[in-house]
Amino acid sequence: MSVEQVAVLGVGMHPWGKWGRNFVEYGVAAARDALADAGIDWRDVGFVAGADTMRNGYPGYVAGATFAQALGWTGIPVTSAYGACASGAMALDAARQRILSGMCDVALVVGADTTPKGFLKPNKGERGDDPDWLRFHLLGMTNPAYFAMWARRRIDLYGATSDDFAQVKIKNARHGLANPYARYRKEVTAEDIAKSPTVSSPLRLLDICATSDGGAAVVLTSMDYARKHLGSSAGSADPLVKVAAISTVTPTFPNTILEMPNFATDSAAGIAPPDRGFKQAIGDSAYAQAGLGPDDVDVAEVYDLSTALELDWYEDLGFCGVGEAEKILRDGVTTVGGRLPVNASGGLACFGEAVPAQALAQVCELTWQLRGTAQGTQVDNAKVGISANQGLFGHGSSVILTR
Amino acid sequence: MSTTKIPAVEGWFTMTPTSAPTPVGAEPVALIGTRCTESGTYFFPPERVMSRAPGFAGSELVEVELSTRGRLWSYTDAQYQPPEPFVAPTEPYEPFCLAAVELAEEKLVVLGQVVAGVGVDDLLVGMEMELVLGTLYSDDEHEYTMWKWRPVAAEDGAATDDTTSTLTTTSTLTTTSTGVGS
């Protein structure tokens, strides 16, 4: 069931960091870079989609309009999407739908965030019917506590060790060393990780991604528009990168893996769980749309909220069998130079998470990788790239790009 | 000072369970779930409006007490004080463990804090755990009660006297500017 493709004509990012400025600034900087990269004037954009942020007041809840106003109202239709870590992919999907339905030729997708220090936490106010509020109040269950529970499962089920987890961080830190958009550009040693304080056992501070400020933007166009545009005017979109899939699936009942911010899993007592779990289904849907499989993938950007979670993704995306992630990591398969480099950008280990921008940042990185113009670590001759992420409340996404 | 015990959350657990055995040296508690009568699936926290099992929207939901024992599915601890609306029961903050326990009958995994004095080194995936009534925090008028997990083998007194646990020896850590991510 291959889905019709659209073109990625331009991408842009604002460097990740802890800049402490208004998130709109980062989004606008990224949008202008993406438009310049595409060689398209803002006034020629027919649709704008924003990925929302929950931490920056009303402008964050209406991100699409916020960015459209900041770039200068042009009267185009707008949407704003929120899907936790998948927000950027949801906004991207809205743009793709507009283009594929013939309602516009050019769409701009923007996500940006300004994050506070420390743990991500719920908004203020007493909300006894909000599971995200209740899990902090009744359990003290932070996001890293969930990451830690999943990491513990790898140790218990597959014999993973803290050193395996450390190797993920070491690899990603190396990958991100020269990436101008990364926040952390420093080699990390196993000793550094072992010396960092435990946050939630078995995860230490350096196993867990930070929260960051950042912005990312993508210009999508119809294939016809891209061909005409590239034939007639400037732009750096050569080779032309295409969106082959955007997966934004939800879990299937009963979801038997503990998910943020839930108190319990679904019950499998009355109804059998699906053969493929939620995170596997995220990738399955993307592969089905693209008409591709794990063997076709040359480069991947996956959500390393924790070092151990990157290993889960290897298996969920079919890069190896269940319980084999540590082995392919150790064998160098997922290091740049290996068969299937993962997080050549440096991943969240080097970026920290800027929630609404992150799924779009993955698309920016994969676009550069497929064009052969990655500014950090370039993967040789990559033709197919896949991204994956997962967030709260049953959200996750995967995007496949091809050239 | 006399305080009244009230549940930290309404309708999610009972302090007077009808079927659960009383744990040794602790007060009993049972989680309240609902069961979708047609599909046989369970919900916790209890669904009271409609069954979330697709295709069973018309099914009746009945309130049930969930099993008070299960197997440890995974566990961790909170070495840093969680942010608000978490209320630290002690000053200074003392790290505590969190457990995810799989209930065999209901085929679901439920989270809970682990009773004070039990550290991650005392826990192993697969071990048998039981629910006991605990205190989430107290103020001048109320003691807010909450369900807590503890290893079945560890009796209440023994567990709280365990000064070798990793938790009781851990110093308080400050959150650094790099943040405790996500």
Image (cartoon, coloured by chain):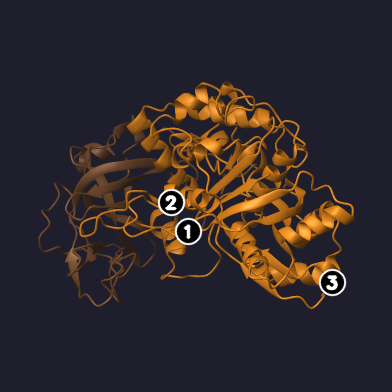
Chain colours: A orange, B brown
Q: Are marks 3 and 1 in contact (CB under 8 Å)?
A: no
First in sequence: mark 3 or mark 1? 3
Residue A181 to residue A51: above or below:
above
User: In terms of image quadrants, where is residue A55?
Assistant: bottom right
Q: Which residue is mark 1?
A: A249
Q: Which mark is residue A366?
A: none
Residue A208 to residue A326: above or below:
below
Residue A93 to residue A104: above or below:
above
The chain identifier of the residue carrying mark 2 reads: A
Nearer to me, A245 or B154: A245
Is label 2 in a helix, a strand or a loop? helix
Is label 1 in a helix, a strand or a loop? loop
First in sequence: mark 2 or mark 1? 1
Q: Are marks 2 and 1 in contact (CB under 8 Å)?
A: yes
Horizontal placement of A96 versus A208: left or right?
Answer: right
Residue A168 locus on image (x, y percent)? 55, 30
Crowd around label 2: few <14 · some 14–19 · many ≥20 (10 Å): many
User: What's the amino acid at mark 1?
Assistant: Val
Horizontal placement of B129 versus A170: left or right?
Answer: left
The chain identifier of the residue carrying mark 1 reads: A
Q: Are marks 2 and 3 in contact (CB under 8 Å)?
A: no
Residue B134 locus on image (x, y percent)? 28, 54
First in sequence: mark 2 or mark 3? 3
Q: Which mark is residue A72?
A: 3
Is disc 1 on the same chain as disc 2? yes
User: What's the amino acid at mark 2?
Assistant: Ala
The chain identifier of the residue carrying mark 3 reads: A
Q: Which residue is mark 2?
A: A281
Crowd around label 3: few <14 · some 14–19 · many ≥20 (10 Å): few
